[in-house]
Amino acid sequence: MKKLQLFLLVLALGFGSAVKAAELPIDPNSTFKYEVVKLLEDLPIELEEEEKVVNLTITFNKDNEIVVLSVDCDDPYVKSVIKKRLNYKKVNSQLDKSIREYKLPVRLKA
């Protein structure tokens, strides 16, 4: 089930749900989405629903670390797990400094 969730996450990120908070898209050659997928591998989450979409709002600090601003989800456990996995994890991708917040839809499937 965890591999299925990871596959669906990769699929969701690959199909136009690019990380952005403005009209400026991220470079398609960026490895940022793959870094986020790697950080969210094997989430210890059991879903009651067949599918759940969680919207993340993130930014980056001066050390190029992810800072989770919000997790739009009604389940506090899912919020907690995602925040713990992403908060203050360093990414190697070069991101556009003019964009302050990125919105990332994450699709989880049971």
Image (tube, rainbow, N blue to C red):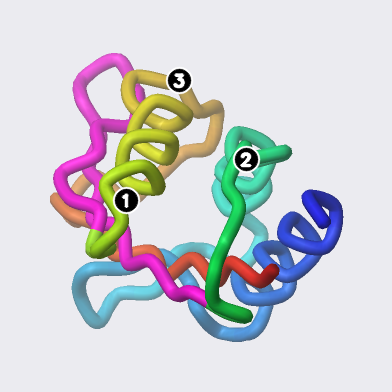
From the viewer's perspective, tell me whether residue 69 is left or right of residue 86.
Answer: left
Residue at 42%, 32% in the rendered image = 86
Judge depth for marks 3 and 1 and give the one in front: 3
* Residues in magenta, as a range: 52-71
Where is 97 relative to 80, above or below? below
Pick whichever of labels 3 and 2 is earlier in the sequence: 2
From the viewer's perspective, tell me whether residue 62 is left or right of residue 103.
Answer: left
- Residue located beneath label 1 in the image: 96
Residue 36: image quadrant is top right
Residue 19: image quadrant is bottom left
Decide whether residue 58 is among the magenta residues: yes
Residue 43 pos. (x, y %): 62, 40
- Residue located beneath label 3 in the image: 90
Residue lying farthest to the front in this orientation: 48
Decide whether residue 9 is among the magenta residues: no
Q: Which amino acid, mark 3?
A: Lys
